[in-house]
Image (cartoon, helix red, strand yellow):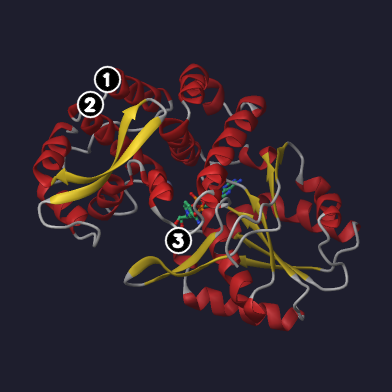
């Protein structure tokens, strides 16, 4: 189903303990079983709380715990979850609950989209990065040859963002998640960008008030962009700021060396420099680099990465025609344009200067 169907995103501390109330309010069935999908790291810390809140409220709760990491976004884990769903007696009125980061959200969401041609889905994100993945309705698993290639659009009934869960996140995942938060500022909201610039330390210290504010603005921007464009046309492309270079860096560096958020941080610095070359004010580069540094993110290419390999990884992308590339280019802080004819020569120069 296409279109503008909206769903609530609740953000606050201790929402997991109140999950029963939120589920009841949003008419999740107590007569049909629920399946919580989570990963081992999250299960250890947060699953028992959720199970007990829902059981106490009268829901029939089952849980499936998958190994952590991108490898679980696979067709074989998908099949295991469908098996689990059948064994637990999930029916058309059942809901699947994703408790975890983007991996769990994408995987569980794809199971919810496919099981009996689609059942209800609830997101309980536990990473900062998941503010991005839990909004917009894209769900998917990977194929060995391509990431996110087997997927669907399936909107959640509601998103419950419990800030308390974020307190247990590794510091590196905190920073990497903040990279997508500031991306939303850089593409859409100059005032929010300035706020992050001023409040970076509070965010890194996981101050709940600062985090709650940043995540609500980040989710809000993502929701605005995708509600105007749920099926990936031009507007939605602005969400890819920093991602053309970033994806290439992830591929060349290997996914273990650079986290996604780290790679797009470097990518956003490159895009800002490109923007200035194409006429944006110098502050676009200065502010972008400063705010990313303040968030503890990398703003330079690791020395050992080879420019040719990076260029090749970028040109692999089907969107590029001879000699030119499609880029999300900043024109001011909080503003970008899609430039479909950036010369590959200029991009090479930008990549060189990132070292
Ligand atoms: P993730 O889900 O793998 O989580 C990162 C790590 O943190 C994992 O090891 C996880 O076990 C651990 N973790 C999660 N919550 C924790 C907590 N509260 N305390 C301690 N540890 C915790 O990764 P991610 O960065 O959240 O998401 C990345 C995924 O999101 C990628 O697969 C990407 O493709 C996807 N994504 C999807 C969209 C979309 O629109 N659907 C958008 C962006 C990213
Ligand atoms: Zn991203």
The structure residue drawn at horizontal position 48% and vertical position 28%, both measured from the top left corner, is 189
| Camera-side residue of 278 and 304 | 278
Instruction: Count neighbours of disc 3 (C-alpha within 10 A) and say few if under 14, some if 14 to 19, many if 20 or more.
Output: some
Q: In the picture shown, does residue 210 fall above or below 54?
A: above
Label 2 CB, ligand 2: below 8 Å? no
Is the residue marked by circle 2 packed among few (<14), some (14-19), or many (20+) residues within 10 Å?
some
Q: Which residue is mark 1?
A: 281
Q: Quadrant of residue 319?
A: bottom left
From the top left corner, tell me how far across and down residue 235 is, in percent: 42, 47
Q: How many marks?
A: 3
The one of 55 and 181 positioned closer to us in this rendering: 181
Label 2 sits on residue: 276
Element class at badge 2: helix
Distance, label 2 to label 1, CA atoms, is 6 Å
Pinpoint residue 351: horizontal percent, then vertical percent: 17, 39
Q: Quadrant of the C terminus?
A: top left
Q: Secondary structure at mark 3?
A: helix
Q: Position of residue 223 (x, y in %)?
A: 57, 45
Image x and y of residue 159, in percent: 68, 50
Q: Is residue 66 visible from the viewing direction of this image?
A: no
- Give the vertical position of 25 relative to 61 (above or below): above
Tag 1's secondary structure?
A: loop
Closest to the observer, 258 or 240:
240
The answer to whether the beta carbon of the residue marked 3 is less than 8 Å from any atom of ligand 1 is yes
Q: Earlier in the sequence, mark 2 or mark 1?
A: 2
**Position of 193 relative to 254 (above/below):** above
Report the Cα–Cα distance between label 3 and label 2: 35 Å
Q: Are marks 2 and 1 in contact (CB under 8 Å)?
A: yes
Provide the residue designation for mark 3.
70
User: Rounded to the nearest whole Å, what is the CA distance between mark 3 and mark 1?
Assistant: 39 Å
């Amino acid at each position: 189903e296409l279109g503008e169907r909206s769903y609530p995103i609740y953000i606050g501390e201790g929402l997991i303990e109140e999950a029963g109330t939120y589920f009841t309010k949003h008419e999740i069935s107590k007569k049909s079983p629920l399946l919580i999908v989570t990963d081992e790291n999250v299960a250890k810390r947060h699953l028992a709380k959720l199970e007990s809140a829902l059981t106490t409220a009268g829901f029939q709760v089952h849980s499936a715990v998958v190994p952590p990491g991108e490898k679980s976004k696979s067709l074989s884990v998908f099949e295991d979850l469908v098996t689990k769903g059948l064994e637990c007696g999930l029916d058309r009125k059942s809901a699947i609950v994703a408790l975890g980061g983007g991996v769990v959200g994408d995987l569980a969401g794809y199971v919810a989209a496919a099981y009996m041609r689609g059942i209800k889905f609830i997101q309980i994100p536990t990473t900062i990065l998941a503010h991005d993945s839990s909004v917009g309705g894209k769900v998917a698993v990977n194929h060995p040859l391509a990431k996110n290639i087997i997927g669907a659009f399936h909107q959640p009934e509601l998103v419950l963002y419990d800030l308390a869960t974020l307190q247990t996140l590794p510091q590196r995942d905190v920073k990497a998640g903040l990279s997508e938060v500031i991306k939303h500022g850089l593409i859409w909201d100059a005032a929010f960008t300035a706020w992050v610039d001023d409040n970076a330390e509070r965010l890194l210290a996981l101050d709940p008030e600062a985090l709650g504010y940043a995540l609500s603005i980040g989710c809000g921007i993502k929701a605005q962009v995708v509600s105007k464009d749920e099926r990936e046309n031009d507007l939605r492309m602005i969400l890819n700021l920093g991602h053309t270079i970033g994806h290439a860096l992830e591929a060349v560096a290997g996914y273990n060396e650079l986290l996604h958020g780290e790679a797009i941080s470097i990518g956003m610095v490159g895009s800002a420099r490109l923007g200035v070359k194409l006429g944006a004010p110098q502050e676009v580069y200065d502010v972008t680099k400063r705010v990313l540094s303040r968030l503890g993110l990398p703003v330079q290419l690791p020395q050992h990465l080879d420019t040719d390999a990076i260029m090749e990884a970028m040109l692999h992308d089907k969107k590029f025609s001879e000699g030119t590339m499609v880029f999300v280019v900043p024109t001011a802080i909080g503003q970008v344009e899609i430039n479909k004819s950036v010369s590959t020569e200029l991009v090479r120069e930008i990549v060189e200067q990132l070292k």
